[in-house]
Image (cartoon, rainbow, N blue to C red):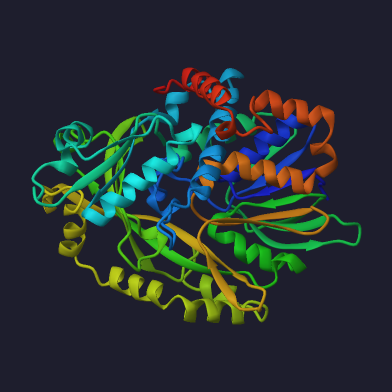
Amino acid sequence: MEEPDVILIGAGIMSATLGILIKELDPNCKIEIYERMSEAASESSDAWNNAGTGHAAFCELNYTPEKEDGSIDISKALKISEAYEVSRQFWSYLVQKEIIKNPEDFIHSIPHVSFVWGDDNVRFLKKRHDALTEKSLFKRMLFSTDKDLLNNWIPLVVKNRDENIPVAATYMPIGTDVNFGSLTRLLFEYLKNQEGVSLYFQTEVEKLKKQDDGKWKVKVRDLATKKSRKIKSPFVFIGAGGGSLRLLEKAAIEEGDGFGGFPISGQWLRCMNPDIIKQHNAKVYGKAAVGSPPMSVPHIDTRMIDGKQELLFGPYAGFTTKFLKNGSYLDLIKSIQTDNIVPMLSAGVNNIPLTKYLIEQVMQSQGDRMEALKNYFPNAKAEDWVLETAGKRVQVIKKDKNGKGVLEFGTEVVNDDDGSLAVLLGASPGASTSVSIMIEVISRCFPNKYNSEEWQAKLKEMIPAFGETLNDNEALCTQIRTMTSKILKLVN
């Protein structure tokens, strides 16, 4: 029986990031990677399956909610923005080391814009801007209600609007667009050529069980030959997107009790008119309708996919029982266990507005979708747009202190007490903050090595501001952003 030091399940951005980090920290580490699809980044990491904003909290209004006293809570925005800067530093290291040859294969500068209309929303956006620009990470953000300036920033969005309705926008020139599918494949292309690394596609994990010696026995099946084999390893990471929950349940660790998943499908309107596409060069995020869930935040996005500029609007959500785009309609049913049935049912009862929203989304006609688009592009014509299916999101359901279920919007790392297994659950802003999340996995699961002088020094080499917060040090923030912008060929 083979015994690699590390097993990675799922060939998405999380496993790719963790694999590179571990291999850089310990070049002698033996790693095996299993992916059920025929290539890397086929599910949530693929460019057409995720929002790809390079989430830095510059434009996502759901990260800065207004509190009851009227003030703006910016804590989540600061956390996400700090984490994205860590990703930029790590990607810069990979470019410098020529692990990635050309940063333009996966990242480009695209301004990030928040756009609102109506008196209350304009006041909200101004308060948000005032709160954020006090912080080093957001000082470059501009605010305006001037329609001539807005027309310069986002002409498609501003033209032919009702002159009597006030509008406002914030503009962040240092925003980015990231093709996480391309980035993932670049990382695996490097990894598979390293000594001690084996990457297996069309390979499905059937079972995993902890042995008396603390190691995990994993049974995998080659989907082409139908042959199975077993492997043992002292550490397993499950980063299988929507497939992670079922594997967590198979692992049967105490820390995984009560976790469930609520799958949501996604769709985009994709512009097919090149004349329209070239008129828009920004990621424009709006405010979710009152009562709508966080994932419903509408945005009209310039994207760079496979070297071509694209324009998408959405997302349009819908209910699904699949946990993966290439999954089974039985995924949701199979995920219900005795330990999570109560949390899942109570989460359903407590999220009736979400259920109502999803039903409404499913019932939408193309005309309904176009009406939503016209809020952000008043001149939009139906013949210029086609509907594209995006990836699946499995929102995390977990037990609260009363044993009932809470629906979480975000990412969650679950690991057993000895750090031999780590599982990543959840959705946005996962990919953009993947480096920070995977460093957290390493700190939890390899605490002695993580705290060693050798690993701390290497982490500092890969992430120059490691252990420091840029928001608390304006000079360091400027220095790091200047450095990463130059290496990644980004606007600064």
Between 8 and 298, the one lying in front of the other is 298
Residue 470 or 295: which is nearer the viewer? Answer: 470
Which is nearer the eye, 351 or 19? Answer: 351
Q: Residue at x 53, y 70 (%)?
A: 331
Query: Measuring 17% from the left and 57% from the top, which residue is drawn there?
Result: 370
Residue 251 visible in the displayed image:
yes
Residue 179 x %, y % = 43, 37
Between 50 and 155, the one lying in front of the other is 155
Question: Can you say whether 337 is above or below 249 in the image?
Answer: below
Q: Locate residue 168 relative to residue 228 in the image: left or right.
A: left
Which quadrant, please, contains the C terminus?
A: top left
- Image location of residue 199, percent across then percent down: 64, 41
Position of residue 288 measured from the top left corner of the image (x, y, whole percent): 33, 59
The quarter of the picture where residue 175 lies is: top left
Position of residue 329 measured from the top left corner of the image (x, y, whole percent): 46, 71
Q: Residue at x 37, y 41 (%)?
A: 129
Tell me if I can see residue 195 in this picture.
no
